[in-house]
Image (tube, coloured by chain):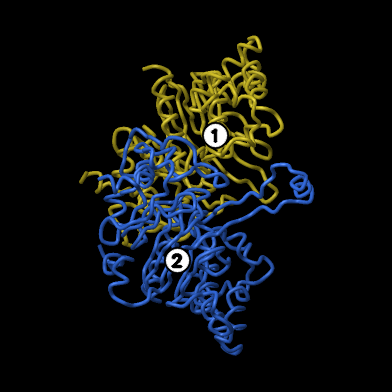
């Protein structure tokens, strides 16, 4: 068995605010292998983005990684000095944000920014760096990359801007890309183009990809594995097809039922009652129990992550096993 | 297929039954012009080639909505769907064309009639954070309009507001709170309660669930369907999310750069899309049923509405484009019962 590109073990990232400790990420573990896509799914405030920021070492105070290991090709990133981390960031590990303007500097031309990124990690001539930038733009499907290098970010459309951000992430052919809702703000037809690029990238260059999203339909088509987060914890994980066809955790069941789908047109959606709890002073036990149709007294104790079938994990003491048996 | 199929509503058949449609749009257009500032006007006087920039946000749209129908209006950024919704809701005046409400032109109505037309059409907005006055308590947000319009007496206002809140799925005990004390889903319910408080029979929902989390979105969609049954409402449901539109609508209208390119009953659009744009839109939508598939986007960018392509607006991105598409605007014509599409290919075939 080869060393996985990324292995996160029992990660805990907490925010120490004046109002109390917010356990944004609380005991999260997963593995991503070379050329594979992990879909990290959850609703607002589930901790999926903070998980991404923790991996790339960009959690700002009052937040802090308080426990756990982030093994990138076997090296623990949580113990790495900032100097070494900066060497990896943007080089071996890259991140793509929902808003490309978080990556792009609005007052610099695209070529300036891209050449800077290349030269930050490699001693190459300016001309060679420009060549690399040009190739990267072409790779993500930007027409006439030579001319576009001279443009400013505001001269691009939203979809093109996101492509530039992706091109910058690709400059050093990273081993791991963390994509945080990169297509959420884009139109459907443009989203399709970006997803196609992402798929090509993983299959061709062996880059491992973590795709953070709230959209189960995107993950269904893109990812190999899926981890569903709720209130800072992964509540279910496994191969995409198995999780979506036979979900174990009642939250995953509710989430899938909430997606309007072709087969159930006009029928009421199987909604989850209530709303996501505040992460501040979250009581012990299963965080979903207040909304869960299967909740019982035992749920007041935190359920452990358990493997119910090979590769199928859920954090629930009464999972939907009957459906699995039927499937 | 329950409630949706009970009303096989098609615009083509509306004329046959003779009844005036609930709402009808005839050749409705909306242009936004950026007026020239002093320097530009001066430059033009001196012979510089300065022109006013005009955006055709909505360009000659015909549409009819029948009573009790849910019409889904779909399109990408800049296609004019929100502008069309605003004109239908009476917030914006069309630059050309006419909007007929129960067979009578909206802009010729005056006094009490005009007020009634406006009251009976209400709008639900995308952003529940921006569309509620942060300085008013929920009871005032919901109760103000019915009181002003004399729909309820002050002595009965309290009970009336309670009823509105309860119907939208909110606990009336919370009515003395301010909007910031509610979550996004709850705020959208306040917006719905406010709209329904003036007893409308037509709701224009502009991306009403787009800002909500999936599980909350499902709750609000279910609420819309319940209200439709209980109050016999008619909806114009504007959304970029095809899954949501498919779930809710009886009939779907697809817009691209200000024009309607296709219109058909929901089942039909999703089973037999006719316009190449509709086809590529449907192909691009990720679906939860489709696993590990090869994504393919429509080629090219959405052109700027400031300078739309000639002829058929979709021709630069269309895989079937012919010479004719570059010069001649295709008209929306009937291709099957209740199914209209604006594509030259339908004539060639």
Q: Which chain is yellow?
A: A
Which-is-in-front pick, marks 2 and 1? 2
Residue beneath label 1, please?
A160
Q: On the rendered image, what quadrant is the C terminus of chain A found in?
A: top left
Q: Is residue A81 above or below residue B198?
A: above
Q: CA distance from mark 2 to mark 1?
A: 36 Å
Residue beneath label 2, please?
B26
Query: So how many labels did they put on this image?
Result: 2
Q: Chain of mark 1?
A: A
Residue drawn at x 38%, y 34% is B296
Quarter of the image for residue B224 reads bottom left
Residue B339 x, y percent position in the rendering: 30, 58
Q: Residues within 10 Å of mark 1 (few under 14, many from 20)?
A: many
- Lateral position of residue B281 relative to residue A309, left or right: right
Q: Nearer the viewer, residue A320 or B85?
A: B85
Q: Chain of mark 2?
A: B
Q: Nearer the viewer, residue A182 or B276?
A: B276
Q: Is residue A141 above or below residue B131?
A: above
Q: Nearer the viewer, residue B292 or B53?
A: B53
Residue B317 x, y percent position in the rendering: 42, 38
On whether disc 2 and disc 1 are found on a single subunit, the reply is no
- Lateral position of residue A18 relative to residue A217, left or right: right
Q: Residues within 10 Å of mark 2 (few under 14, many from 20)?
A: some
Q: Is residue B187 visible?
A: no
Label 1 residue SS: helix
Q: Is residue B46 above or below residue B110?
A: above
Q: Which chain is blue?
A: B
Residue B67 x, y percent position in the rendering: 37, 74
């Amino acid at each position: 068995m080869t060393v996985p590109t990324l292995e996160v073990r029992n990660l805990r990232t907490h925010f120490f605010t004046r109002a109390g400790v917010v356990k944004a990420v609380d005991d999260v573990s997963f593995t991503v292998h070379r050329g594979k896509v992990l879909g990290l799914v959850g609703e607002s405030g589930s901790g999926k983005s903070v998980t991404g920021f923790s991996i790339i070492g960009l959690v700002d105070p009052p937040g802090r990684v308080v426990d756990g290991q982030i093994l990138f090709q076997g090296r623990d990133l949580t113990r790495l000095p900032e100097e070494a981390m900066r060497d990896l960031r943007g080089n071996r590990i890259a991140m793509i944000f929902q808003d490309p303007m978080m990556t792009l500097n609005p007052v610099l031309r695209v070529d300036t920014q891209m050449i800077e990124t290349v030269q930050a990690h490699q001693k190459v001539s300016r001309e060679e760096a420009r060549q690399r930038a040009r190739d990267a733009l072409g790779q993500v499907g930007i027409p006439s990359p030579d001319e576009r290098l001279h443009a400013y970010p505001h001269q691009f459309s939203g979809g093109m801007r996101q492509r530039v951000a992706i091109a910058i992430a690709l400059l050093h052919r990273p081993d791991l890309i963390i994509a945080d809702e990169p297509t959420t703000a884009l139109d459907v037809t443009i989203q399709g183009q970006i997803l196609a690029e992402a798929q090509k990238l993983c299959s061709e260059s062996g880059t491992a990809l973590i795709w953070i999203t709230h959209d189960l339909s995107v993950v269904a088509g893109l990812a190999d594995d899926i981890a569903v987060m709720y209130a800072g914890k992964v509540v279910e994980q496994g191969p995409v097809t198995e999780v979506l066809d036979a979900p174990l955790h009642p939250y995953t069941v509710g989430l899938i039922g909430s997606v309007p789908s072709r087969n159930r047109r006009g029928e009421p959606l199987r909604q989850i009652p209530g709303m996501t709890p505040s992460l501040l002073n979250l009581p012990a036990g299963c965080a979903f129990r207040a909304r869960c149709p299967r909740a019982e007294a035992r749920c007041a104790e935190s359920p452990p992550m358990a493997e119910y079938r090979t590769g199928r994990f859920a954090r629930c003491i009464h999972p939907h096993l009957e459906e699995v048996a039927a499937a | 297929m329950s409630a949706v199929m009970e009303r096989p509503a098609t615009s083509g058949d509306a004329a046959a039954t003779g009844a005036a449609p609930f709402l009808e749009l005839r050749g409705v257009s909306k242009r936004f012009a950026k007026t020239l500032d002093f320097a530009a006007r001066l430059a033009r006087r001196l012979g510089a080639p300065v022109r006013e920039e005009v955006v055709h946000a909505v360009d000659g749209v015909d549409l009819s909505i029948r009573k009790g129908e849910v019409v889904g209006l779909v399109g990408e950024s800049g296609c004019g769907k929100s502008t069309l919704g605003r004109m239908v809701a009476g917030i914006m005046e069309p630059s050309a064309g006419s909007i007929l409400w129960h067979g009578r032109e909206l802009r010729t109505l005056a006094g009490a009639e005009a007020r009634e037309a406006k009251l009976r059409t209400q709008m639900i907005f995308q952003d529940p954070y921006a569309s509620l006055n942060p300085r008013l308590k929920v009871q005032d947000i919901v109760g103000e309009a019915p009181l002003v319009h004399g729909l309820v007496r002050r002595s009965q206002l309290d009970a009336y507001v309670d009823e509105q809140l309860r119907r939208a799925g909110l606990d009336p005990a919370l009515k003395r709170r301010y909007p910031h004390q509610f979550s996004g889903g709850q705020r959208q319910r306040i917006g719905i309660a406010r709209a329904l408080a003036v007893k409308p029979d037509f709701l224009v929902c502009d991306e009403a669930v787009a800002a909500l989390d999936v599980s909350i979105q499902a709750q609000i969609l279910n609420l819309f369907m319940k209200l439709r049954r209980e109050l016999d409402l008619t909806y114009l449901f504007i959304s970029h999310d095809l899954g949501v539109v498919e779930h809710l609508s009886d009939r779907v209208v697809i817009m691209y750069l200000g024009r309607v390119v296709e219109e058909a009953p929901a089942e039909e659009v999703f089973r037999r899309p006719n316009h190449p744009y509709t086809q590529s839109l449907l192909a691009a939508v990720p679906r939860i049923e489709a696993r590990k598939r090869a994504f393919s986007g429509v080629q090219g960018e959405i052109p700027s509405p400031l300078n739309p392509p000639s002829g058929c607006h979709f021709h630069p991105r269309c895989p079937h484009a012919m010479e004719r598409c570059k010069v001649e605007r295709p008209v929306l014509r009937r291709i099957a019962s209740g199914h209209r599409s604006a594509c030259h290919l339908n004539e060639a075939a």
